[in-house]
């Protein structure tokens, strides 16, 4: 049997191939490290929702397999495993990395500094080196406002002195420095996103903060609202703030995830530049204001207990988001505090249902 193909079909096929190649260049496959964790899983959702090809690596030490969407390639392993990284890059054609894997507890970093310098700094160096060997072009780094230490002014601009006050903050700053020095002499550009206080959950309830014994205020408060805790500790009421409790900039995790996608697009659009930007809304809420909002959302008061101040807690931590808004045209969609809390509360209820259906071992 003879098959005749018109020149129009051949041309169309060639055009489609060119379009596919252009699309692959415009949207390279992305590897998300720590993609089964809280923020990483939301970045995976944001990428997948926007049509990107995405892969996850996570050792599940703090992440959860259920947080990785169905159909997303998942590799259980450590980012220090260079053979595994090379295999992933080869199999997935990775062109960009979003790096979330690491340890995140400030107090624990003071008690176990070497663990944090290994997990957050040494392993990041391994990942960067592996990315260079595989000719990965773009690198998004999950950094932290902890690099600022105790700032002398608020809101905080990116150019203020960087003086971390704990090993966690130093481990993040050291990785930022490694990226800056490396990208200055290699065909790799990067974006360091310095997070403020991340809270909330995916509005569609596909992921949320699932870690047991979490220390984030919103997570603790919604656990108390559902009687998973007896009370919420208020650490100090003598800060130099309107109501005496610490003020923080709370950012919805889905808005943060969207910022990562926009940052990657910005790196691809201008491969000659790298970026460092704050991720926050530019306004803060005190501990009491957050707890009052939880009372509103729940419809009843939750128990509070005044406790001693924690060493190193600044009065106020609020981002100046001017750079990210101007650079990425980033417009938050979930900036209302009550919305953030409502999503966190709904996710906490879903976790309870999952435990009730025998998934407890996968969550606790």
Image (spheres, rainbow, N blue to C red):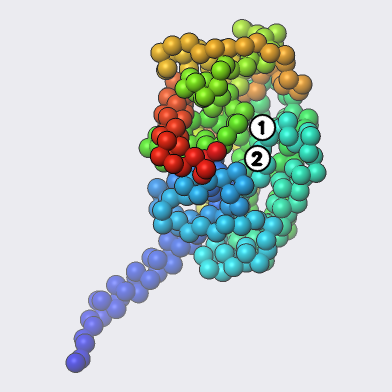
Percent x, y for residue 198? Answer: 56, 31
The reply to whether residue 101 is in sight is yes
Q: Which residue is painted at 25% across and 76% down in the image?
A: 8
The reply to whether residue 140 is in sight is no
Provide the residue designation for mark 1: 145
Q: Which residue is painted at 44% across and 11% down in the image?
A: 300
Q: Which residue is painted at 68% across and 13% down in the image?
A: 307
Q: Which residue is painted at 48% across and 46% down in the image?
A: 67
Percent x, y for residue 84? Answer: 62, 64
Percent x, y for residue 128? Answer: 68, 56
Q: Is residue 265 above or below residue 257?
A: below
The image quarter containing residue 310 is top right
Provide the residue designation for mark 2: 143
The image quarter containing residue 16 is bottom left
Q: Secondary structure at mark 2?
A: strand
Q: Which quarter of the image is occupied by the C terminus? A: top right
Q: Which quarter of the image is occupied by the N terminus? A: bottom left
Is residue 12 toward the left or the right of residue 221 in the image? left
State the CA–CA distance, disc 2 to disc 1: 7 Å
């Amino acid at each position: 049997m003879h098959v005749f193909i018109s020149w129009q079909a051949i041309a169309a096929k060639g055009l489609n191939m060119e379009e596919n190649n252009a699309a692959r260049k415009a949207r390279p496959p992305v590897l998300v490290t720590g993609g089964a964790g809280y923020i990483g899983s939301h970045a995976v959702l944001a990428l997948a929702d926007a049509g990107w090809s995405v892969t996850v690596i996570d050792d599940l030490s703090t992440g959860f397999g259920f947080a990785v969407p169905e159909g997303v390639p998942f590799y259980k392993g450590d980012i220090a495993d260079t053979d595994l990284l090379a295999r992933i890059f080869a199999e997935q054609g990775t062109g960009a990395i979003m790096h979330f894997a690491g340890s995140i507890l400030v107090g624990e970093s003071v008690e176990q500094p070497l663990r944090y310098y290994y997990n957050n700094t040494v392993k990041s160096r391994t990942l960067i080196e592996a990315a260079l060997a595989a000719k990965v072009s773009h690198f998004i780094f999950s950094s932290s406002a902890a690099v600022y230490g105790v700032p002398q002014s608020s809101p905080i601009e990116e150019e203020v002195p960087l003086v971390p006050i704990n090993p966690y903050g130093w481990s993040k700053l050291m990785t930022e420095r490694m990226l800056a020095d490396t990208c200055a002499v290699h065909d790799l550009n990067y974006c360091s996103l310095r997070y403020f206080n991340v809270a909330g959950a995916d509005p569609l309830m596909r992921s949320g903060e699932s870690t047991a014994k979490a220390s984030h205020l919103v997570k603790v408060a919604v656990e108390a609202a559902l009687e998973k805790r007896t009370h919420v500790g208020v650490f100090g009421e003598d800060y130099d703030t309107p109501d005496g409790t610490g003020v923080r900039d709370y950012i919805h995790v889905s808005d943060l995830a969207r910022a990562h996608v926009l940052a990657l697009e910005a790196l691809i659009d201008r491969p000659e530049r790298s970026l460092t930007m704050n991720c926050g809304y530019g306004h803060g809420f005190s501990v009491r204001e957050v707890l009052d909002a939880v009372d509103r959302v729940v419809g009843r008061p939750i128990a509070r207990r005044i406790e001693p101040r924690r060493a190193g807690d600044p009065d106020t931590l609020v981002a100046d988001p001017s750079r990210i808004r101007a650079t990425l045209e980033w417009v938050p969609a979930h900036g209302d505090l009550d919305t953030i809390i409502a999503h966190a509360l709904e996710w906490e209820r879903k976790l309870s249902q999952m435990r009730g259906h025998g998934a407890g071992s996968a969550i606790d």
